[in-house]
Amino acid sequence: MKKIICVLMVLMLSLSGCSSFNKVDEDKVKDISDKITQTIIDSVDKDKNSAERTESHKIEAKKLNKLDIKSSVGDIYLSVHDSDEATVDIKITASSSSKEKSQELVDSFSYSVEEKWNTIEIDTRLDDVKLLSNNNMQTELTINIPKSIEAFIIKLNVGEIIIDNTDGHFEINNNVGDIKISNSTGSYNLKTDVGEITLNNCNPSEKTELKTNTGDIKAVFSDISAARSIKAEAGVGDIEIATPDNSSYEAEINEFMKDKVVLFKGNQDTKIELKTGVGEIQFK
């Protein structure tokens, strides 16, 4: 979360000095700043008053196929394990004006982990009252799931999302924070307002879309033969995409301050579109 604090501070400075770039959703970022940013920054001085609570949950997930997560502040770690059970570990941390107040916040915080309609639903969203009362709360999630889960919907306000060795369809929306996926096969619809998107050793399938308003996009694909289309767009940031030598594509590259470039390879099976508002593009 320290990296998120730095990103938020840089964002505040950049927005105060630049208003011409219309890709940045300033209203949304301002809302995050007003309600969350200051409390996170203030928490650096409140570590000595912090309190923590950890809990674990197990869900029989052999017949389930979807994971739905809604969270406000905190990192999310997701991976697959050899079991029919899903395990959800949650660490709740609070920092306030005193140790007693922090402990009270941790003890009173409620969340939900439940099975509903073939879906594991996790909701750790915070009330605005807690955020606006000069308190900082975070909920870190570590989740291990069986291979039967193949659809993932994640909505996060502030924090990193780290996914490893997990296949399926991903719908991820993060306001402030990085999205990192490795060793995965699937269709990816990944969006972050402020943060990096990184795909390492991934095999995109069907339609894939990667978008960040402020941040870099880096993807190393090991196989794109199952992908009909790949789109990557960075408002302010660089794009680096690497494909294997045997790839077949038609790639349209729209780089900041440069003419459009169209590249062809093989039978042009995969349509690739890369675009930066302000930033460089490296494609190979």
Image: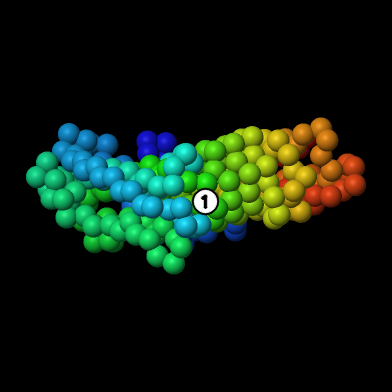
The N terminus, quarter of image: top left
Q: Which residue is mark 1?
A: 148
Q: Return the residue nearer the eye: 30 or 246.
A: 246
Residue 124 appears at what percent x and percent y? 33, 55
Picture quadrant of residue 224: top right
Q: Is residue 264 left or right of residue 73?
A: right
Q: Residues within 10 Å of mark 1 (few under 14, many from 20)?
A: some
> Amino acid under label 1?
Ser
Residue 83, by quadrant, is top left
Q: Position of residue 198 (x, y in %)?
A: 58, 39
Relative height, residue 132 to residue 92 (above, below): below
Choose between 168 and 174: the one closer to the eye.
Answer: 168
Q: Residue at x 67, y 35 (%)?
A: 220
Q: Position of residue 208 (x, y in %)?
A: 67, 52
Colour mapping used in the image: rainbow
Q: Quadrant of the C terminus?
A: top right
Helix, strand or loop at mark 1 = loop
Q: Is residue 192 left or right of residue 277?
A: left
Q: Determine the residue positioned at 28% across, 45% down.
A: 56
- The answer to whether one can see residue 136 in this image is yes
**Is residue 250 something one can see in this rendering?**
no
Query: Left or right: where does residue 42 sit relative to residue 208?
Result: left
In this view, which residue lies farthest toward the left? 100
